[in-house]
Image: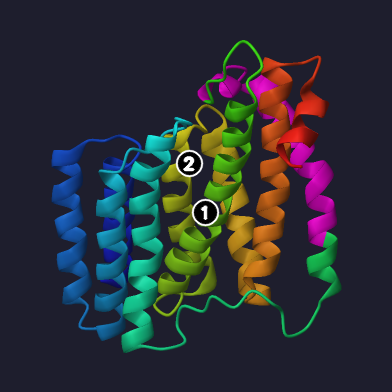
C-alpha cells in the first residue's frame, strides 16, 4: 500500500505539474491521498498529505522563467509556501524531522572531492546539453537583444534563488518526508520525480528528462550520506553559475565573461 501510494503520488505529480492535465491529475491525486490514508501508518498519512498539498500548490503555480519583478512575487509565494508550510507544521508536531541545519558536524573528503568534480562535470554537461543536444535551451530564458544590466542581474538572482529553493524543497522537504517511509533508494527516486517534473516544466526540456533525474538522484544520495544541506547547496550553486554563463554566452558571446563577472559582483 505504501508503494501504491508513492506510485500514485508520482503519477499525480507528472500529470499536474509538467503536463498540466488537471482533471486526470486531480483524480490520481485523490487516489494517492486515499491510498496513503489506507496504509494505516500515521507517518505515511501525515507525510504524504503534506507532499500532496505541496504538489497541488505547485500544479497551479506559474512555473516558468519569466524574469520580471511581478513574476518573482507570484512564483515566489507558492515556492515559499511549499517549503515553510511543511517545515512549520512538522516543527510544531514532530520537531527535528525537517532540519534546516547547514553546517556539517564532521567534514568528509568524499564531499569535498564531489564538489570539486562537480565543476568540470557540470560545465561539460551544460555545454553538451545547451549547445548540442537541445540547442534551443538558452531561449527558455528570454533576454533582450541589447545589453541590459537589470535583466542580467535578474537572471543571476532568479536562477540562484531557484537553485537554493530546489534543494530546500526537493531534498530537505520531499526526500526528508519520504525517507521515514521508504528505504533510501525508493525515497530518492520519489523526490527525483518531483525534481524533474518541476524543472522540466520550468525550462529543462529535451534531454533534461535524462539529465535532471540523474542530478536529482546524486543530490539525494549526497544528502543521505552527509545529512547536511551545505554540500548539496554548494554543488547546485556551482551548476547555477555555469548555467548563467551558458545563457549569457548564447545571447552575448563577445561579452559573456565580463557580463557574468558583473552580474555576480
Q: Residue at image x 14%, y 57%?
A: 30
| The C terminus sits in image quarter | top right
Q: Position of residue 167 (x, y in %)?
A: 55, 59
Say whether residue 176 is magenta.
Answer: no
On the rendered structure, is 16 left or right of 179? left
Give the Cα separation between the discs numbered 1 and 2: 9 Å
Helix, strand or loop at mark 2 = helix
Circle nearer the N terminus (1, 2): 1
Q: Quadrant of residue 49?
A: bottom left
Q: Is residue 166 visible?
A: yes
Q: Which residue is mark 2?
A: 199
Q: Position of residue 110 (x, y in %)?
A: 82, 69
Q: Is residue 4 visible?
A: no
206 to 108, vertically: above or below: above
Q: Which residues are magenta?
A: 114-140
149 to 201, vertically: above or below: above
Q: Tag on residue 58?
A: none
Q: Kindly report the secondary structure that dominates the magenta region of the rendered protein.
A: helix
On the rendered structure, is 166 left or right of 250? left
On the rendered structure, is 167 left or right of 261? left
Q: Quadrant of residue 105?
A: bottom right
Q: Which residue is mark 1?
A: 166
Which is more toward the observer, 156 or 237? 156
Amino acid at each position: 500500500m505504501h508503494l501504491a501510494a508513492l506510485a500514485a503520488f508520482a503519477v499525480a505529480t507528472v500529470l499536474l505539474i509538467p503536463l498540466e492535465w488537471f482533471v486526470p491529475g486531480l483524480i490520481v491525486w485523490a487516489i494517492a491521498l486515499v491510498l496513503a490514508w489506507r496504509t494505516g501508518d500515521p507517518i505515511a498519512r501525515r507525510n504524504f498529505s503534506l507532499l500532496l498539498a505541496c504538489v497541488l500548490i505547485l500544479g497551479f503555480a506559474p512555473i516558468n522563467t519569466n524574469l520580471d519583478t511581478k513574476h518573482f512575487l507570484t512564483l515566489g509565494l507558492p515556492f515559499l509556501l511549499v517549503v515553510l508550510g511543511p517545515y512549520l507544521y512538522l516543527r510544531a508536531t514532530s520537531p527535528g524531522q525537517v532540519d534546516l541545519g547547514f553546517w556539517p558536524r564532521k567534514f568528509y573528503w568524499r564531499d569535498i572531492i564531489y564538489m570539486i568534480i562537480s565543476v568540470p562535470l557540470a560545465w561539460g554537461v551544460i555545454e553538451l546539453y545547451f549547445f548540442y543536444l537541445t540547442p534551443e535551451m538558452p531561449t527558455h530564458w528570454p533576454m533582450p537583444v541589447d545589453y541590459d544590466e537589470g535583466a542580467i542581474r535578474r537572471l543571476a538572482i532568479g536562477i540562484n534563488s531557484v537553485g537554493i529553493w530546489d534543494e530546500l524543497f526537493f531534498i530537505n522537504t520531499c526526500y526528508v518526508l519520504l525517507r521515514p517511509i521508504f528505504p533510501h533508494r525508493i525515497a530518492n527516486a520519489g523526490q527525483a520525480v518531483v525534481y524533474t517534473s518541476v524543472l522540466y516544466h520550468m525550462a529543462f526540456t529535451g534531454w533534461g528528462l535524462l539529465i535532471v533525474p540523474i542530478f536529482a538522484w546524486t543530490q539525494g544520495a549526497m544528502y543521505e550520506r552527509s545529512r547536511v544541506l551545505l554540500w548539496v547547496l554548494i554543488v547546485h550553486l556551482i551548476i547555477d553559475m555555469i548555467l548563467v554563463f551558458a545563457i549569457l554566452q548564447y545571447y552575448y558571446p563577445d561579452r559573456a565573461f565580463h557580463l557574468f563577472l558583473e552580474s555576480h559582483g
